[in-house]
Image: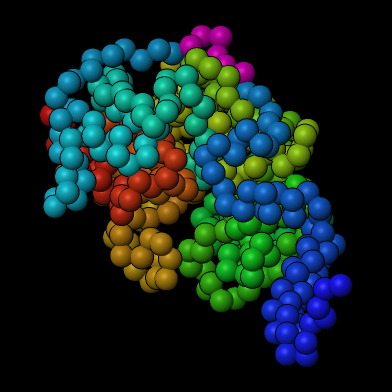
Amino acid sequence: MGKRLGKKQKYILWGILTPVLVFVSAFLILCFVTMGMFSPTYLRRVLTHWDSDVSDYKIFSERMIEKSGTPFVYAKEEDPSIGGIAVGDPNRAQSLDAFVESTKTTSFLIVKNDKIVYEKYANGYDENSINTSFSMAKSVVSLLIGKAIEEGYIQSVYQPISDFIQEFSDEEIGKTTIEDLLLMRSEIVYDEDKFLWFGDDSLTYWHNDLRKLALSHTELTEKYQGRFHYNNYHPLLLGIVLERATGVTVSEFFGREIWRKIGAEYDASWSLDYEGGFEKMESGINFRAKDFLKIGSMVLHGGFWNGEQIVDGDWLKKSTLCAFPIDAGEYAGTFLEGRNIGYQYMWYSTPSNDSSGYDIVAWGKSDQILYISPSSGFVILRTGKADGGVSDWVRTLKELIGKIN
């Protein structure tokens, strides 16, 4: 027979097991609370994946967006010298070719005067690889709101969202305007720093019923005082407005009004919260690089592309360019503080190199960037698995444009 544990050994064993049992019990309680507050699917998603990734389009359901029947194909005038331009911080600058490889970039395309002058794919990607937008999708949402206004589905950006979301008719949140949402300046509470997976960043990305989540999140606060505060409930609410105003899914409206009109050569998709559900409005457009580049070319030309006026030019001016000089207090305490970059209707803008105009940027997590410089005729698309250690991609792309003849 084996020896029994002595009293001292029991104390030691209990001292080891107690914190483990407490931890496991607390974790299980958190799991049950999460399933009760949200759903088992949400819990499974956050525990399985935790952080968002550029390959997440593979795990979400999707709604397909058909390609154009009249595709636009960029002419190519590739300039070999561009690949040798020094890029990056001065103390560790590399050639652009090496820079693309070393910064976890997956596609890097430069269009000048409507012709591709540089095209490179790296880190396991090629021209047929699928990229995801992350928050560049928000800029597409802005385009769709403009189209809905142009076609009479929405009267103006000054309409309260209760005009479309009847659930808010008797709620204070219903007074929030479409413009408040586009500007990221509503009073809707957004807390990304809550414990574990209870923060709003996690919820608005992984939740398996985003409509329900957005419609139940009605808490307001005065702490933002009308200043910029990034909030992923805003695109969700705008998606509900678009659905109810147009009577079709956001994907169908996007495909009909923009994707096919720009001459997309490939089908795209929009990730959904569940099979047959709601578009992930804050992040989920999936595309081949050269097609998304055409959105930039359309914006560059004031909404005219592929032989037609696709988006109203006045809307683009109003929606893409914020007021300069920047009011520093507007962005204090945010990721835009001190960067001379402003936020308008889900587009960023910044002074161009020659100060004769302003460059326009769609920008997503891990520095997915569509950079548009109307004054110099450039459009650049950068997609990547991560930011690649680059501290400021917007500044880097602006400097690169200044170095290309």
Q: Residue at x 30, y 34 (%)?
A: 101
Quadrant of the rendered image containing residue 60: top right
Question: Is 405 or 330 nearer to us in this picture?
Answer: 405
Residue 258, x across and y down, in percent? 54, 26
Please tell me whether residue 67 belongs to the stretch shown in magenta.
yes
Vertical comparison of 70 with 371: above or below: above
Q: Residue at x 42, y 20 (%)?
A: 127
Q: From this viewpoint, which residue is outermost toward the top? A: 70
Please tell me whether residue 44 belongs to the stretch shown in magenta.
no
- 310 on left or right of 350: right
- 244 on left or right of 253: right
Residue 226, x across and y down, in percent? 52, 68
Q: Main secondary structure of the magenta part?
A: loop
Q: How many marks?
A: 0
Vertical comparison of 42 with 199: above or below: above
Q: Residue at x 79, y 82 (%)?
A: 5
Vertical comparison of 109 with 4: above or below: above
Highlighted magenta segment, given as a residue range? 66-71
Q: Is residue 37 among the parts visible in the rendering?
A: no
Question: Is 346 or 384 nearer to us in this picture?
Answer: 384
Residue 51, x across and y down, in percent? 57, 52
